[in-house]
Image: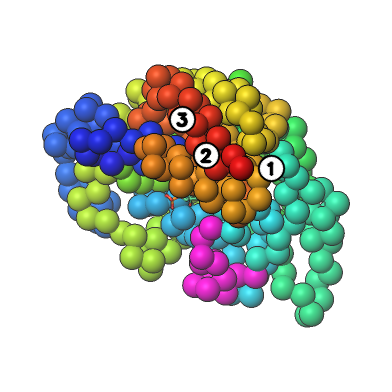
Amino acid sequence: MRESAERLIDLRSDTVSLPTPEMREAIARAELGDDVYGEDPTVNRLEAMAASMMGKEAALLVPSGTMGNLAAMLAHCGRGDRAIVGSQSHTFVYEAGGASALGGVVMAPVRNTDDGELDLDELKHELATPADAHFAPPKLAVIENTHNRCGGAPVALSHMAEVSDLTHSRGLKVHLDGARIFNAALALETTAQTIASHADTVSFCLSKGLACPIGSLLCGNRDFIARAHRVRKMLGGGMRQAGVVAAAGIVALTTMIDRLAEDHANARALAEGLALVAGLNVRHVKRRTNMVVFDAGDPASARRFQAAMKERGVLLSARDATSFRAVTHYGVTRADIDRAVALAAEAAAEAFGD
Ligand code: TLP
């Protein structure tokens, strides 16, 4: 949400959340050094915390989730290697094809089910690529939990275990895009560490539901993190006094995880409210996290609906020509949700009326 006099209800993404007062204080007081030399004590502290929370040997602070996934793919794969990704995954859809454009990695999409899982038959087919000079050798499978384009669905641990077993049995590695891993842990009633145990490497974001201004962490074993460290430098992601970023991250990991329950409850209330608005069709998810995806008729009515909401101060992100995503976060209260639902009823009457 922007810092301005006008109070918007910004449901476009949890990335719009602003840092907490405690984060701003921690940023101001952070002990700093040059992290490219490995000398920023605050970064070192955050990386150690992240590695231990994910049950991995080491961690690396990167500026964004996109760079975390890219550094992981480039550290796992060489030019001409194949990475198996979900057809609806963030790495495949929303990262500008970085692994292919910058690293020569061949991305092989496997269908995502509505629950954010990988279609196992298609995965097996990709894994069965013959060791023949015609084919780009598969090196990596990428899974996402929670799954953004699949409505924030938390992906079941049993599925993760299956993907991990199949992939490892072929000698490939598994990377988890755990941008919202703490939302997944809450919804699955487990720990982030248990989720991450099904992957060799994991990236997670500080700047989504945890409300930090910047930053993601990539975690894995020491060798992998050493390779990723070089890739991060190559990508221009080596930051100097990065303790100003890490200080907020430490506050996030100590104070902001439990409150995600509030975002999940708000998303549930929003889904229930929008489901009662004529003309809107809320997509069902087995377990809701902090997202609501809904359809709003044909493309023209959907455009009118989005504009009518914006006029009333409620921002949504378009998922495609007819559907929208609303995300709850630290900057959205329960009262905002009730107001957003009431305004959606008005906007729908305007957009879908004769
Ligand atoms: N997702 C953003 C947009 O890019 C769509 C959002 O608003 O949700 N993995 C997943 C699963 C993500 O949802 C995102 C951000 C990222 C990686 C990338 O993180 P950043 O934005 O820090 O590069």
| Residue 341 shown left or right of residue 206 in the figure | right
Please identify the quadrant where the C terminus is shown: top right
Magenta-colored stretch includes residue 259: no
**Closer-to-camera residue (317/191):** 317
Residues in magenta? 94-106
Measured along the vertical axis of the image, is residue 265 above or below residue 200? above
| Residue 103 horizontal/vertical position (percent) | 53, 71
Measured along the vertical axis of the image, is residue 332 above or below residue 102? above
Any mark on residue 347, and which?
A: none
Any mark on residue 116, and which?
A: 1
Q: Nearer the viewer, mark 3 or mark 1?
A: 3
Q: Secondary structure at mark 3?
A: helix
Can residue 258 be seen at all in this image of the molecule? no
Q: Residue furthest left?
A: 29
C-alpha separation, residue under disc 2 versus residue under disc 3: 11 Å
**Residue that mark 3 sits on:** 343
The three-letter code of the residue at mark 2 reads: Glu
